[in-house]
Image: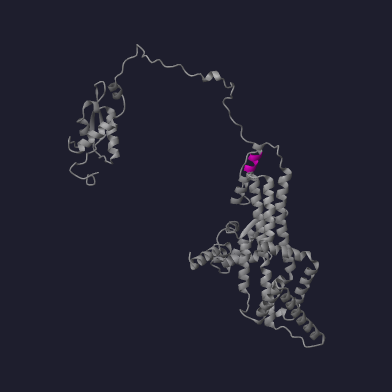
């Protein structure tokens, strides 16, 4: 594969992702607006019935406002469609109620749209300074040379010490410009807005692991201990080998450090109290920055809840599993549970299905009353080879006269007639020209069978077949007339 073809394959794979399929559809602006209005930036769970109503109300308001690209259908139908598109997910909350939440793909799409709606410069002093500082800090933490690390730290300490001494001596403070603050707030909001989708990815991974564990338990093709070991390995790999897992661990470590949480809250408060913040930030952006700590806590709670559901599934199986339970009943119940899961995945929350409380009685006409007896398997008596003296003798010709049509002989005689050896105008004339042994009533069916195989068509006229029975009596039959093809014409030129 060439380089350009490989690049096209990677781009096509990206466009097949649910994030871009959401943004690429014709009604994407309306759907994104609905998601932003209903779920907010923190992706709060919404009860299913409430979201159905909200979707219908918002669509009606957009239609009245003159919007033409409005999805059609009820709120429930649209939510089902968005679930199939992997933009919504339906789950149970702590109280056991069904709720909708946005998937990580939908949140990533919302984040992209939100970043595009912000006014930001493509190049600024703040951005270059941020890049330089990040690269410098990254190098100081990752450089393998001890001397280089010490040199970088000494330079940073000297720079901070000089700035501290300058401010202590009463030197003039350099105030940040409005452009600098605006660019800083934009980058900060961009980083914070990416957190919900990161948490959602970890939550979806745990939900996928839970589904796979339940399927493995139902299949019973592996020991329970092997399934549990596989879950523990996957859970460890999720937290250490994936970008989302490492982000989760870092956020979890942050919230466990009360000093860091307090420092984050104080720094955000100081930035919001800056004199220029009122002219740069709107009410929505200020609320987003002020709720950063709560946003991280809520995301962690959802991830921990999903991980607790996986652990509860394992615990319930280990505690309730009884090796002495009747295997047939256990397999039946597991099949019912698997079918119920499949049915729930393809139906809505209000779908019903009538199930009898007790199975129907089995109607058995006869029960076995006698057990196997080897004496019943005695071979039958041998048939005597000598013929019975009083049995009548039957000749081969007599047996053939009682049989069906002689297709082989009829086919040969019909081919001779078509070759012009015995010309006949119709199938009835051909039948009348045969010898008596080939003019039995059953031979009429044989001729019609051969004519049908060759695709000959009948006419509206009829003709009479004079048949002879084996006892010498005759009988006539009226059959639709079927003309024979002209032997002087090709088969393709013969009249049908």
* Residue at 78% across, 69% down: 260
Q: Position of residue 134 (x, y in %)?
A: 68, 75
Quarter of the image with the C terminus in it: top left
Q: Position of residue 290 (x, y in %)?
A: 74, 71
> In the rendered view, does 421 fall on the left or right side of 72?
left
> In the rendered view, does 455 fall on the left or right side of 382?
left
Q: Main secondary structure of the magenta part?
A: helix
Asked whether 181 falls inside the magenta stretch, the response is no
> For this rendering, which residue is in front, 280 or 156?
156
- Eyeballing the image, is 459 above or below 200? above
- Residue 257 location, quadrant: bottom right
Q: Position of residue 407 (x, y in %)?
A: 28, 32
> For this rendering, which residue is in front, 231 or 67?
231
> In the rendered view, does 434 fall on the left or right side of 276?
left
- Residue 288 location, quadrant: bottom right
- Eyeballing the image, is 16 above or below 432? below
Question: Count the marks: how many?
Answer: 0
The residue segment tinted magenta is: 330-336
In this figure, which colouring scheme has been used for the structure?
one colour
* Residue at 67% across, 69% down: 193
Residue 467 seen from this side: no
Q: Position of residue 404 (x, y in %)?
A: 31, 28
* Residue at 77% across, 81% down: 158
Residue 408 seen from this side: yes
> In the rendered view, does 200 fall on the left or right side of 14?
right
Asked whether 331 falls inside the magenta stretch, the response is yes
């Amino acid at each position: 594969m060439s380089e350009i073809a490989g690049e096209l394959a990677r781009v096509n794979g990206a466009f097949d992702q649910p994030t871009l399929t959401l943004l690429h559809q014709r009604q994407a602006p309306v759907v994104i607006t609905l998601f932003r209005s209903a779920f907010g930036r923190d992706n709060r769970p919404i009860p299913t019935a409430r979201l159905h109503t909200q979707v219908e109300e918002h669509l009606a308001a957009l239609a009245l406002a003159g919007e033409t690209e409005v999805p059609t259908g009820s709120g429930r139908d649209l939510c089902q469609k968005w679930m199939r598109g992997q933009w919504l997910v339906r789950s149970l909350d702590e109280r056991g109620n069904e709720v909708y939440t946005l998937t990580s793909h939908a949140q990533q799409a919302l984040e992209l749209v939100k970043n595009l709606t912000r006014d930001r410069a493509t190049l600024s002093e703040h951005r270059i300074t941020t890049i330089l500082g990040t690269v410098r800090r990254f190098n100081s933490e990752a450089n393998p040379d001890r001397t280089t690390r010490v040199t970088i730290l000494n330079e940073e300490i000297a720079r901070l010490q000089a700035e501290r001494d300058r401010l202590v001596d009463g030197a003039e403070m350099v105030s940040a410009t409005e452009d600098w603050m605006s660019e800083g707030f934009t980058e900060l909001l961009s980083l914070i807005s990416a957190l919900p989708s990161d948490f959602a990815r970890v939550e979806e991974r745990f939900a996928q692991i839970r589904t796979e564990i339940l399927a493995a338990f139902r299949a019973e093709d592996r020991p329970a201990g092997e399934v549990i070991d596989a879950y523990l390995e996957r859970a460890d790999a999720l937290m250490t080998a994936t970008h989302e897992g490492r982000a989760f661990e870092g956020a979890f470590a942050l919230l466990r450090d009360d000093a860091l949480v307090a420092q984050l809250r104080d720094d955000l408060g100081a930035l919001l109290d800056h004199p220029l913040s009122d002219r740069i930030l709107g009410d929505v952006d200020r609320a987003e920055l002020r709720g950063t700590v709560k946003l991280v806590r809520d995301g962690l709670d959802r991830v921990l809840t999903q991980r607790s559901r996986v652990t509860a599934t394992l615990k319930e199986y280990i505690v309730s599993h009884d090796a002495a339970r009747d295997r047939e009943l256990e397999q039946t119940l597991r099949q019912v549970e698997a079918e119920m899961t499949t049915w729930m995945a393809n139906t809505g929350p209000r779908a019903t299905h009538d199930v009898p409380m007790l199975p129907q009685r089995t109607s058995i006409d006869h029960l076995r009353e006698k057990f196997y007896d080897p004496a019943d398997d005695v071979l039958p008596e041998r048939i005597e080879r000598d013929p019975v003296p009083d049995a009548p003798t039957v000749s081969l010709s007599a047996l053939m006269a009682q049989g069906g049509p002689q297709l082989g002989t009829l086919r040969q005689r019909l081919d001779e007639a078509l070759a012009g050896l015995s010309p006949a105008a119709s199938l009835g004339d051909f039948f009348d020209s045969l010898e008596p042994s080939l003019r039995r009533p059953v031979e009429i069916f044989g001729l019609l069978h051969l004519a049908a195989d060759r695709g000959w068509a009948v006419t509206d006229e009829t003709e009479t077949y004079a048949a002879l029975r084996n006892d010498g009596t005759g009988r006539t039959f009226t059959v639709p007339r079927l003309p024979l093809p002209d032997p002087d014409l090709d088969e393709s030129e013969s009249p049908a």
